[in-house]
Image (cartoon, rainbow, N blue to C red):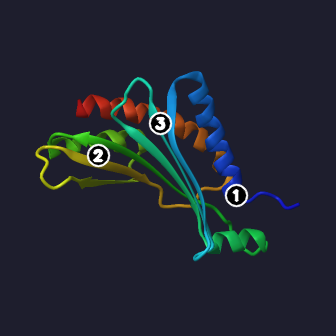
Amino acid sequence: MFDPTVFENLKVVVEGALYDLDLEGQILIVDRQDQVDMAKMGRYYQITFKDLSIDTIHVYIDLKMDLDNLVTELRNLDGDPGCILEIGFIFKLKSLDVCPQIKQVLTTIWGGTREIKQEISYLYGTKNEFTNNSKVIFHRLIHEGNIDDLLQMIDYILESIHQLHNVIK
C-alpha cells in the first residue's frame, strides 16, 4: 500500500466539499472527469457544477499534476510537489460590453495577484450570443498545506457566481 499523492488528497477534499453542497441542495454537480494521461504521465481532475439558484453559470475546478511533480513526490526528491489549480466560470453574453465589469468582479473577489482571463467564443451565424469562459489562474502550485484555502475558495466561487449573475443579467 502506498500513500496517496498530493493530487489525490486535494481532489478528495474538493470533491467531498462540493458533494456535501450538492446533497444540501445548494449546488448541482453536472460533470466530473478524473483522468490519467498515459502519454505525459500526468493526472487531471475537473468537476463542473452550478448554483441551483442561478442556472445560467457553470463553474469548473481543474486540478492537474504533471510528471515532474509526481516524480518529485513519489521518489522523495528535493522539491515541494504540488498541483496546478484553475477555476472557470462559463456563461452566455448578449454583449461584450460587460467584459471589463466581469474582470473587475473577479479581481475584487479573488485579488489582484490572480490572473483573470476571459475566452470569448460564438457559433458562426448567431447574433449577439457569446460564450464567456472566465478563468481564475493561480500562478503557483497548490499543496496539502493549502487544503483550508481550497475549502475557503468554494465560498469565493459561490460569491463569484452571484456577483457575475448581477453583471450579466
> Looking at the image, which residue is at 36% across and 36% down?
57
* Place of residue 146 in the rendered image (x, y in percent of width and height, measured from the top left): 63, 49
Q: Is residue 109 above or below residue 55?
A: below
* Place of residue 101 in the rendered image (x, y in percent of width and height, measured from the top left): 23, 40
> Looking at the image, which residue is at 41% across and 45% down?
111
* Place of residue 35 in the rendered image (x, y in percent of width and height, measured from the top left): 59, 60
Query: Circle 2 sits on which residue?
Result: 103
Task: Decide which of tag 3 and tag 2 comes sooner along the chain.
Answer: 2
> Looking at the image, which residue is at 62% across and 42% down?
15
Is 125 placed left or right of 109 in the picture?
left
Task: Decide which of tag 3 and tag 1 comes sooner along the chain.
Answer: 1
> Looking at the image, which residue is at 58% across and 29% down?
21
Q: Are marks 2 and 1 in contact (CB under 8 Å)?
A: no
Q: Residues within 10 Å of mark 3 (few under 14, many from 20)?
A: some
Task: Decide which of tag 2 and tag 1 comes sooner along the chain.
Answer: 1
Q: Secondary structure at mark 3?
A: helix
Q: Nearer the viewer, mark 2 or mark 1?
A: 1
Identify the image quadrant of residue 119: bottom left
Depth check, front residue: 60 or 29 = 29
Q: Is residue 26 above or below residue 9?
A: above
Q: Residue furthest right?
A: 1
Given the image, on which type of amino acid does mark 1 rest?
Val
Query: Circle 3 sits on which residue?
Result: 156
Quarter of the image with the C terminus is: top left
Q: Residue furthest front?
A: 125
Is 166 placed left or right of 34 in the picture?
left
Q: Is residue 86 above or below residue 107?
A: below
Quarter of the image with the N terminus is: bottom right
Q: What is the CA distance from the residue labelled 3 to the residue labelled 2?
A: 15 Å
Q: Secondary structure at mark 2?
A: helix
